[in-house]
Amino acid sequence: MLNFKTFLKTLKDKIDLKQKKIYLAVSGGVDSLVLLDLFFRIKDLKIEVLHCNFKLRGAESEEEENLIKTICKKKKIILHTKSFNIRKKSSKQILARKLRYLWFKKMLKTNYFNYIALGHHLNDSIETIFLNLIRGTGIKGIKGIVFKKKYLIRPLLDFTKKDILSYAKNNKISWIEDSSNINETFLRNKIRKILNKVLNNEAYLGIKKSFNILKSEYLMINNHLNIIKKYILLKTNIQEKTLSLKNLFNLNPIKIYLYKLLKVYYFNNIRNLIQIIISKSGKKINSKNSYFSIKKKKKHLILYRNKKYEKKNFS
C-alpha cells in the first residue's frame, strides 16, 4: 500500500535525506505527479522540478507542461522546463531518452543537486524484464530496475501501478494519460497489456522476492569476477595488461568469462575473442569503438589502450 508514511520509510531506508537537494523528473503522467505530491510533503527537503517537452504529441504535450506549471506555482516549487524539437524520423523514443538524461546530468552538475528522482515503479521493472528477455539478456537484464544508479533514484520502485493510482485517487491528483501508452506498435505496451491480465498481489510478492534474490546473486557474480580478474592478470601498468592464456583456458564456460571480463573494454563480439585466443602469436583485434586492442603474444594476451584514446579509462 502506498501512502506518505510507507513512502518516506522506504526512501529513508535507502538514502540519507539530510541536507540533500533533489530534482524531480515530472511529466504529466500519474506516476511522476504522485511522486511530486509525496516529495512535497517531506519537510526540510530542497526539491525542484524538471520537465522535458519533446512536442511529440501536439496539444497533449503542451497540456502536460501547463498542468505542471500550474501545480508547481500552487505548491511554490521551482520548475525548470526544456523544449526539444526532434526531427529525426526513426528512433524518436531512444533519442528523446538520450536528450532527457543529458539535460538532467547538466542540471545536476550546474546547480549542485544530489539526485534526480524518477517515477518508475514495480510494474515498469517487470515490463523491462520481459523486454530484455525478448531481446536476449543475462542475469543483469532480469534482476529488475535498480533503486539507485549514480545520481538517479527511483523512490516508487517498491510500489505497483495499482498502488499509485489508488494514491492519486485518494489524494485527488489530476494527471494526463499519455496517448502513446495504448499504442501497440511499441513492444512495451503489448507486454503491459498481457501482464495486466495475470499480475495480482501474490504475483507481485513473488516477483519482489525474486528481484532481491537475483540482485544478491548478481552481486555475488561480480565479486567472483573480481577474484577471477586477479587469477588471469599476470601484470599491469598504465599502458597495458598481460593476461594468462593458461589460466583463461581453465575457466568454464570460457566464452562467458571472456565476455564478462572484457566487455568493459568494449569487446562485445565473443566469436572474435575466441578466435584471438586460439590464433597464432601476433594476431590482433580491436574493440568495438577502437579504444582498446588485444594482441596474442605466445602464451599471453596483451590488452592495451590505443594511443589515440589515451585518456579513456583503463582501470
Image (tube, grey):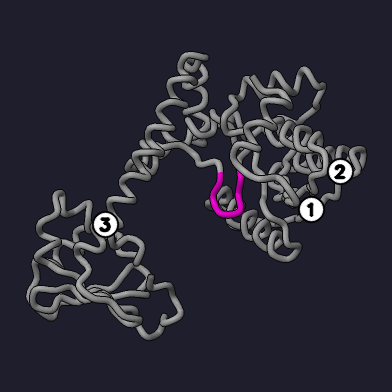
Whether 44 is among the magenta residues is: no
Q: In the image, which residues are magenta?
A: 148-153
Q: Earlier in the sequence, mark 2 or mark 1?
A: 2
Q: Which mark is residue 81?
A: 1
Q: Earlier in the sequence, mark 3 or mark 1?
A: 1
Residue 183 is drawn in which quadrant?
A: top right
| Disc 2 to disc 1: CB gap under 8 Å | yes
Residue type for callout 2: Lys
Q: Which residue is mark 3?
A: 227
Residue type for callout 3: Ile
Whether 150 is among the magenta residues is: yes
Q: Nearer the viewer, residue 233 or 74?
A: 233
Q: Residues within 10 Å of mark 1 (few under 14, many from 20)?
A: few
In the depicted structure, whether residue 146 falls above or below residue 37: below
Residue visible at 71% across and 30% down in the picture: 30
Residue visible at 19% across and 77% down in the picture: 295
Q: Nearer the viewer, mark 3 or mark 1?
A: 3
Q: Which residue is mark 2?
A: 69
Q: Nearer the viewer, residue 67 or 248?
A: 248
Q: Residues within 10 Å of mark 3 (few under 14, many from 20)?
A: few
Q: Is residue 242 left or right of residue 131?
A: left
Residue 70 is drawn in which quadrant?
A: top right
| Disc 3 to disc 1: CB gap under 8 Å | no
- Secondary structure state at the residue bearing disc 2: helix
Q: Is residue 39 left or right of residue 310?
A: right
- Secondary structure state at the residue bearing disc 1: strand
